[in-house]
Amino acid sequence: MRRAIYPGSFDPVTNGHLDIIERARKLFDEVIVAVAHNDAKAPLFTLEERLDLLRSTMGKIDNVRVDHFSGLLVEFARTNDAIAVIRGLRAISDFEFEFQMALMNRKLEAQVETIFLMPKEEYTYLSSRIVKEIARLGGDVSKFVPPPVAKALAAKIK
Ligand code: ADP
C-alpha cells in the first residue's frame, strides 16, 4: 500500500487543492488529505468546518480520505505508514518555504519523501488567502472554489 499525505490548512479548500488531490490520487494507492490544526494562523473556518467542506466537496472518492492532525507532520506520516508528503507548487514564491520544509522534514524523518505537484496553469494564481480576500470585498468566487465553499464563504462573510 503506497500511501501519501497531502497536508495543509485548507482554509477553505479551493479548486487548486482539488486539482492537486486528483493528480496525487493517480500516483498513490491512497491519499490522506490532512487538515492542520493551526490556531496560530487564525483560520476563517474552524477545523470542523474545513473538514466538512472538504468532505462535502469531494463526496466519496475511492482512494482519498480526509483527516486532521496537530503536531509534527512527519509524526502523522509515520503513524499512518505514509511514504510521501504531497505539496503543491504554484510559483517561485512558494519555493523557498517549501524547500526549507521539505529538507527539514527529511532531517526529521528520512523515510518520508516530499513530492511537489504543479496544478493546471489556471490555478497557479489561486490561494485560499486571495479567495477569502475577494469574498470579503464582495467579489464572485464561484470560479475558484467548489459550490459548498462559495456558499460557506457567503454565509461567513456577511
Ligand atoms: P498551508 O497552510 O500548508 O500552506 P494551504 O491550504 O494554503 O496550506 O496549502 C496546502 C498545500 O496546497 C500547499 O502545498 C500549497 O502550496 C498547495 N496549494 C494551495 N493552493 C494551491 C493551488 N492553487 N495550486 C496548487 N497547489 C496549491
Image (spheres, grey):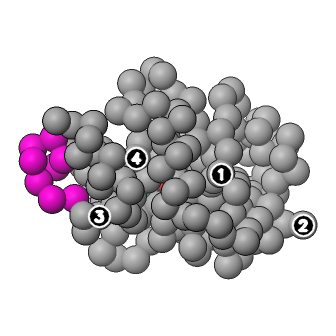
**Image position of 117 (left or right of 32):** left
The image position of residue 126, as x and y in percent, is: 31, 60
Q: Residue at x 41, y 42 (%)?
A: 11
Name the residue beneath numbered marker 3.
144
Q: Which amino acid lies under the numbered mark 1 shown in the image of this protein?
A: Val
- Residue 19 is tagged as none
> Foreground mark, 2 or 3?
3
Q: Residues within 10 Å of mark 3 (few under 14, many from 20)?
A: many
Q: Residue at x 51, y 28 (%)?
A: 38
Q: Which amino acid lies under the numbered mark 3 shown in the image of this protein?
A: Phe
Q: Earlier in the sequence, mark 2 or mark 3?
A: 2
Q: CA distance from mark 2 to mark 4?
A: 29 Å
Q: Are marks 4 and 3 in contact (CB under 8 Å)?
A: no
- Residue 66 is tagged as 1
> Foreground mark, 2 or 4?
4
Q: CA distance from mark 2 to mark 1?
A: 17 Å
- Residue 12 is tagged as 4
Q: Which residue is at the front of the view, 22 or 90?
A: 22
Q: Are marks 4 and 1 in contact (CB under 8 Å)?
A: no
Mark 1 near ligand 1 (CB under 8 Å)?
Answer: no
Q: Are marks 2 and 1 in contact (CB under 8 Å)?
A: no
Q: Are marks 2 and 3 in contact (CB under 8 Å)?
A: no
Question: Which residues are the magenta region?
Answer: 134-141
Q: Which residue is at the front of the view, 72 or 25?
A: 25
The image position of residue 138, as x and y in percent, is: 9, 47
Q: Earlier in the sequence, mark 4 or mark 1?
A: 4
Name the residue beneath numbered marker 2.
1
- In the rendered image, the residue lying farthest to the top is 40
